Image (tube, grey):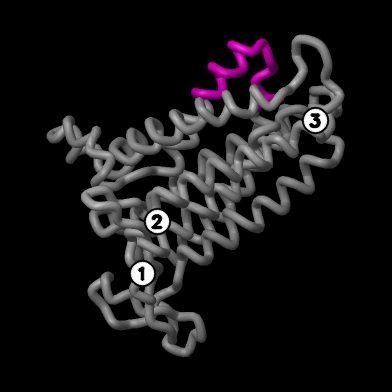
Amino acid sequence: MLMYPKIDPVALQLGPFAIHWYGLTYLAAFALFYWLGTRRLRHPPFAAITGPGAWTRKDVEDMLFLGVMGVVIGGRLGYCLFYKPAYYASHPLEIFYVWQGGMSFHGGLLGVIGSQVWFARSRGKPFWQVMDFAAPCVPPGLAAGRVGNFINGELWGRFSDPSLPWGMVFPQSGSMLPRHPSQVYQFLLEGLLLFVVLWLYARKPHKQAQVAAMFLIGYGILRFVAEFFREPDSYLGLLALNMSMGQWLCVPMVLAGIGLWLGAGKRAVV
């Protein structure tokens, strides 16, 4: 088994100001989205669109700006609502204490969807075209976030078989027994694997909204699987059917993706 390496969460200290690795992973996520977005401009059907509806680098920049706002606001509110509603109902001002940590992917997803509704309407673009454009660019950012989780030594996995070669001891968990490095699992599944699948799928002819649908289905399934190896939040534990909160939040996500993919069959191939 392996021992979790002690990694200083502060990447650079400049007097009273500290630059944390976790913050840098967020910057990396946004940079990766922008770089991949500029590549998407060359792909069909976006490269073929001309006139007022044409896609430009400015569109990618505006999508990113609004998306960042959606991630931060939605992620924080989602965490407060999904994971600790009673606590934040009695401590409402602490909702704004983002430096204390606490972000939810599913809340961030809802925030991003809301921000892209605004973007689509302001640009006069079909909403599902916007979501199809963005979907393949998201997973590398999720992978960057899991790197940040690992550096912080948080969101560790459940206990593993002592014979598992990559089982890792996280002393900060309060136990010296080996655990699954679930941050690495999520990096590989929700980050790299989902990116490869979506990037290749998006290059093939498909109906509008089906790339976005594949993101919902793919992330939901992969996150659901990864949650079997991730330690449930101590203040929640396992819920009904021995499923974690993360798994329960993935169920409507997958169902929505399936419904969207099937409904997209009525649209034209792009």
Is disc 2 placed on a helix, strand or loop? helix
Q: Nearer the viewer, residue 236 or 24?
A: 24
**Picture coordinates of residue 110 (x, y %)?**
47, 31
Q: Amino acid at mark 2?
A: Trp
Outermost residue, front side: 15
**Picture coordinates of residue 264 (x, y %)?**
74, 28
Cα distance in 3D space between marks 1 and 2 = 10 Å
Is disc 1 placed on a helix, strand or loop? loop
Cα distance in 3D space between marks 3 and 2 = 39 Å
What is the span of residues highlighted in magenta in the rendered image?
114-130
Tell me the residue at 50%/25% (across/down).
66
Q: Is residue 121 magenta?
A: yes
Q: Which residue is labeled 2 in the image? A: 21
Q: Which residue is labeled 1 in the image? A: 7
Is disc 3 placed on a helix, strand or loop? loop
Q: Is residue 155 magenta?
A: no
Q: Amino acid at mark 3?
A: Lys
The C terminus lies in which quarter of the figure? top right
Q: Which residue is labeled 3 in the image? A: 207
Q: Nearer the viewer, residue 9 or 188?
A: 9
Q: Residues within 10 Å of mark 3 (few under 14, many from 20)?
A: some
Asked if disc 1 and disc 2 are in contact, CB closer than 8 Å, the reply is: yes
Cα distance in 3D space between marks 3 and 1 = 45 Å
Q: Residues within 10 Å of mark 2 (few under 14, many from 20)?
A: many
Is 38 situated above or below 172? above
**Picture coordinates of residue 180 (x, y %)?**
44, 73
Q: Principal SS element in the magenta part?
A: helix
Outermost residue, bottom side: 163
* Residue 101 shown left or right of residue 151 in the figure: left
The answer to which quarter of the image holds residue 90 is top left
